[in-house]
């Protein structure tokens, strides 16, 4: 198993550009989520999905869109990038919700918005 | 609302010293899970341990041990005989019933000096 994979590893964008951060897992996990990590802030939840076709907002959803058309993939879309979205983005997955299962994280995508 | 507090922002110890990382949580759920993750300088998030709210037994894994006390809402992490490879940011996290996403503390940066 490759586990949770994320692409790209690093990206530079200009303000106003759009892009999609990719996340995939090959463990047949139902639950997937996106977090952003900023210095001194820990990890904050952006969006999550409890299964294909179902998504919900986390703590900091503004400026981001998600969709879950398959169990394996959970892309995060930045509609119009802003410098405040400069961060490290982590995707995570688990068999079900947080109660029973440990979430496993991808390697992260470092995003710089100029 | 759920909350995790890691009051220690940074800790620096000399190799072979013991060190305890504090974690205090808030939740109204009676069933919940607590987690510790390690983030080494390479940036990935590594799962260390999960404890459920019904099991207050302390856990030991090699040089790592965890002290869970519901009476004080704490889940502290101790590293015995610290090593340089233990240098990392350590996150405590909490999840509750159902599909409640993980809530992270802001992390404690541990530096172990040779």
Image (cartoon, rainbow, N blue to C red):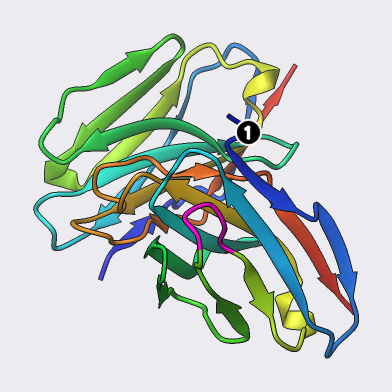
From the image, which quarter does the C terminus of chain A lie in? bottom right
**Is B77 above or below relative to B114?**
below
Residue shown at 73% from the left, 71% from the top: A20
State the residue position of label 1.
A2
Estimate the x, y position of residue A78 in percent, counting from the top left.
70, 79
The magenta region covers: A70-74
From this view, report whether residue B24 is shown above or below residue B103. above
Left of A3 or right of it: where is B99?
A: left
| Residue A43 visible at all | no
Q: Quadrant of residue B70?
A: top left
B57 vs A9: above or below: above
**For mark 1, does the 10 Å Cα neighbourhood hold few (<14), some (14 to 19), or many (20 or more) residues?**
few
Magenta stretch holds residue A96:
no
Residue A52 occupies quadrant: bottom left
Write down the chain letter for disc 1: A
Q: Residue at x 21, y 48 (%)?
A: B73
Q: Give B82 or A91, whichever is nearer the viewer.
A: A91
Q: Under tag 1, what secondary structure?
A: loop
Taking the spot 84% from the left edge, 85% from the top edge, the residue there is A17
Q: Nearer the viewer, residue B11 or A65?
A: A65
The picture places residue B19, in percent across and down from the top left corner, at 49, 25
Residue B81 left/right relative to A109: left
Left or right of A17 in this view: A27: left
Q: Position of residue B102 (x, y in %)?
A: 38, 56
The rendered magenta stretch, by its main secondary structure, is classed as loop
Q: Position of residue B103 (x, y in %)?
A: 39, 59
**Residue at far front of view:** A70
Residue A94 visible in the displayed image: yes
């Amino acid at each position: 198993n490759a586990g949770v994979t994320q692409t790209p590893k690093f990206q530079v964008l200009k303000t106003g550009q759009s892009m999609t951060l990719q996340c995939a897992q090959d463990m047949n996990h139902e639950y997937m989520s996106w977090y952003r990590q900023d210095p001194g802030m820990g990890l904050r939840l952006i969006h999550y999905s409890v299964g294909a076709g179902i998504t919900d907002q986390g703590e900091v959803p503004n400026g981001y869109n998600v969709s879950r058309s398959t169990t394996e993939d959970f892309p995060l879309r930045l509609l119009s990038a802003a410098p405040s979205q400069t961060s490290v983005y982590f995707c995570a997955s688990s068999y079900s919700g947080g109660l029973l299962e440990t979430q496993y994280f991808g390697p992260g995508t470092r995003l710089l918005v100029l | 609302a759920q909350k995790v507090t890691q009051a220690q922002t940074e800790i620096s110890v000399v190799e072979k010293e013991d060190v305890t990382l504090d974690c205090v949580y808030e939740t109204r759920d009676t069933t919940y899970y607590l987690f510790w993750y390690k983030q080494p300088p390479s940036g990935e998030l590594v799962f260390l341990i999960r404890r459920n709210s019904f099991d207050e037994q302390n856990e030991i894994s090699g040089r790592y041990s965890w002290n869970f006390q519901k009476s004080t809402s704490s889940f502290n992490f101790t590293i015995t005989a610290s090593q340089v490879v233990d240098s990392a940011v350590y996150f405590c996290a909490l999840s509750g019933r159902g599909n409640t996403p993980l809530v992270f503390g802001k992390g404690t940066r541990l530096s172990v000096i040779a």
